[in-house]
Image (cartoon, helix red, strand yellow):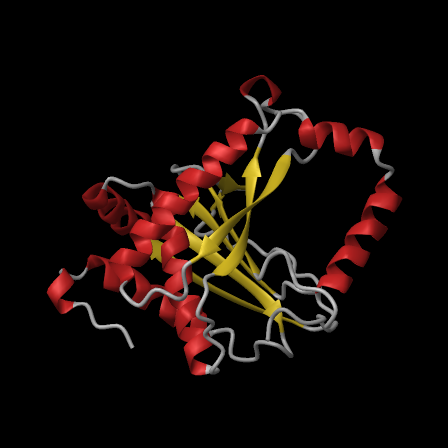
Amino acid sequence: SFNGRVSAHRRFAFTQLSLDEVKAIKNRHGFTVNDVIVSVCAGAVRRWLIKHGELPEEPLVAQIPVSVRREQQSGTFGNRILLMTAPLYTNIYDPIARLEQTHEALVDMKERHKALPAELLRDANQFIPPALFSRAARLTFSLSASKRGRPAWNLVVSNVPGPQFPLYMAGARLEAHYPISVVTDGMGLNITVMSYCGHLDFGIVADREQMPDLWSLTEWLREALTELQAPPSRVSVK
């Protein structure tokens, strides 16, 4: 239901998970922090889909923004992001199997990313007029949300590494950094994660009409993390 036309209304939910706990899981399996985060998101979205009777037999398709900013471009202005595609294994019952499949899918995505020219997005931004690019994007997402089209992505999952030391403004310490991103026609759910000072700050944005119970995802994110911490014989997934 979050792949239809979006309304003018939004819901925003936020929660925080321990970065150390995520790192412990990734060390146990030899994977990456991003693998665990994406798998946790898949577990939470799976619970939402089951609750609403919408769980498909195939995995969902996640849009995962990837930075193409090179080291020598550090500190420069402008967005340098490539939108990549990866399966979100909401169809897998076992959380460990879901994590393993997520790892393999993200490795494949990284290989595809390496095969693309680093200047691809920069060239598009330079030569396509912003107004034309914006209209084309709106038309594309609108068509994908119609009955005639099919969305290229079901949702956004974005993990943004942040500083692991405290930040201050006018003497006040920044306690958390909950990102607020965007949704579009055909893609009415966005889960963005910012790591900061030993924890992961989740900002979840959705169309209010499509997902009125958005806050339930915050509880299920915690449950999905707990499932990955439990011994295999004690894992219980509904």
Name the image quarter holding residue 228: bottom left
Name the image quarter holding residue 149: bottom right
Which image quadrant: the C terminus? bottom left
User: Residue farthest to the top?
Assistant: 72
Whether residue 137 appears in this view of the structure is yes
User: Vertical placement of 91 versus 208: above or below?
Assistant: above
**Left or right: 78, with 63 as reference point:** right
Q: Which one is in front, 88 or 169?
A: 88
**Left or right: 186, with 52 as reference point:** right
Residue 21 coordinates in the image, percent (x, y) = 25, 51
**Left or right: 227, with 106 as reference point:** left
Q: How many marks?
A: 0
Whether residue 161 appears in this view of the structure is no
- Residue at the spot 59% in from the left edge and 75% down from the top edge: 1
Residue 175 coordinates in the image, percent (x, y) = 43, 51
Name the image quarter holding residue 88: bottom left
Q: Which one is in front, 125 or 99?
A: 99
- Residue at the spot 20% in from the left edge and 58% down from the top edge: 229
User: Vertical placement of 49 versus 103: above or below?
Assistant: below
**Left or right: 224, with 150 as reference point:** left
Q: Which one is in front, 167 or 112?
A: 112
Residue 35 coordinates in the image, percent (x, y) = 36, 47
Residue 219 coordinates in the image, percent (x, y) = 37, 71
- Residue at the spot 61% in from the left edge and 38% down from the top edge: 82
